[in-house]
């Protein structure tokens, strides 16, 4: 029959194993960027009596949003919580509809939004960090056998002490994306180009 000391030793071993398993599971959780751009819910008729097909295409070579660079370590990549083209389409479509555009898959006009670049590079040092971000979207609008192509480019830099906060990176990226979507929806050339 085991003694109380042997029981305590076995219990401690079990507790240590459970702790290690828990810590390993917590350490291996995958970080993801929560992308949730917000646009104005205000309605207008700037696209009244106009219809178009709408598609969003992600042409980026990589699916991540954030790349964290640390000296002597592998680059840590942080993807979005969902496909970026799906996220943008889910915000862009209602924004156009709220401004009077009829989204119809058989319309003669076509609007394609191409995601060229959507990235944040974090250069992490021991006690400080720097970020460089770039968001490049191209709107290609086809109407009456003609095409209008406009590129919307937004770049940013920041720096701070200690380490970069993913929540702050999310907030800033969501603001960049929201602004770009509103610029596209409210673009006078796009409005006039659609017949």
Image (spheres, grey):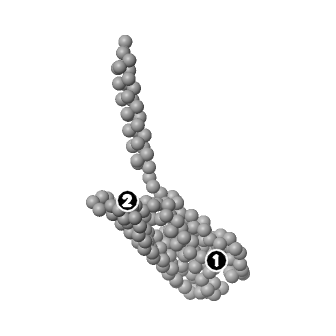
| In the rendered image, the vertical position of residue 116 relative to residue 81, given as above or below | below
Q: Nearer the viewer, residue 92 or 171?
A: 171
Element at label 2: strand
| In the rendered image, the vertical position of residue 3 relative to residue 156, given as above or below | above
Q: Is residue 55 visible?
A: no
Q: In this rendering, which labeled residue sits more in front, label 2 or label 1?
A: 2
The percent coordinates of residue 64 (x first, y second) are: 43, 63
| In the rendered image, the vertical position of residue 35 relative to residue 133, given as above or below | above
Looking at the image, which residue sits at the far top? Answer: 1
Q: Nearer the viewer, residue 182 or 4?
A: 4
Q: What residue did someone put label 2 on?
A: 76
Q: Residue at x 35, y 24 (%)?
A: 9
Q: Residue at x 36, y 29 (%)?
A: 13
Element at label 1: strand
Q: Quadrant of the N terminus?
A: top left
Q: Nearer the viewer, residue 87 or 119?
A: 119
Crowd rating for badge 1 (residues with CA inside 10 Å; few <14, some 14–19, many 20+): many
Mark 2 or mark 1, earlier in chain: 1
Q: Residue at x 45, y 65 (%)?
A: 65
Asked which quadrant contains residue 8, the reply is top left
Q: What residue did someone put label 1 on?
A: 52
Asked which quadrant contains residue 95, the reply is bottom right
């Amino acid at each position: 029959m085991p003694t109380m000391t042997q029981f305590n030793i076995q219990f401690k071993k079990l507790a240590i194993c459970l702790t290690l398993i828990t810590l390993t599971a917590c350490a291996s959780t995958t970080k993801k960027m929560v992308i949730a751009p917000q646009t104005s819910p205000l309605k207008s008729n700037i696209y009244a009596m106009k219809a178009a097909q709408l598609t969003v295409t992600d042409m980026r070579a990589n699916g991540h949003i954030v790349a964290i660079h640390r000296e002597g370590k592998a680059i840590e990549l942080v993807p979005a919580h969902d496909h970026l083209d799906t996220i943008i389409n889910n915000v862009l479509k209602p924004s156009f509809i709220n401004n009077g555009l009829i989204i119809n898959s058989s319309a003669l006009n076509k609007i394609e939004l191409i995601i060229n670049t959507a990235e944040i590079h974090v250069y992490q040092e021991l006690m400080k960090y720097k970020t460089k971000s770039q968001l490049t979207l191209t709107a290609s609008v086809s109407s009456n056998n003609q095409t209008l192509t406009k590129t919307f480019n937004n770049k940013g830099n920041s720096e701070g002490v200690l380490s970069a906060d993913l929540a702050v990176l999310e907030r800033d990226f969501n603001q960049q994306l929201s602004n770009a979507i509103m610029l596209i929806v409210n673009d006078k050339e796009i409005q006039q180009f659609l017949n």
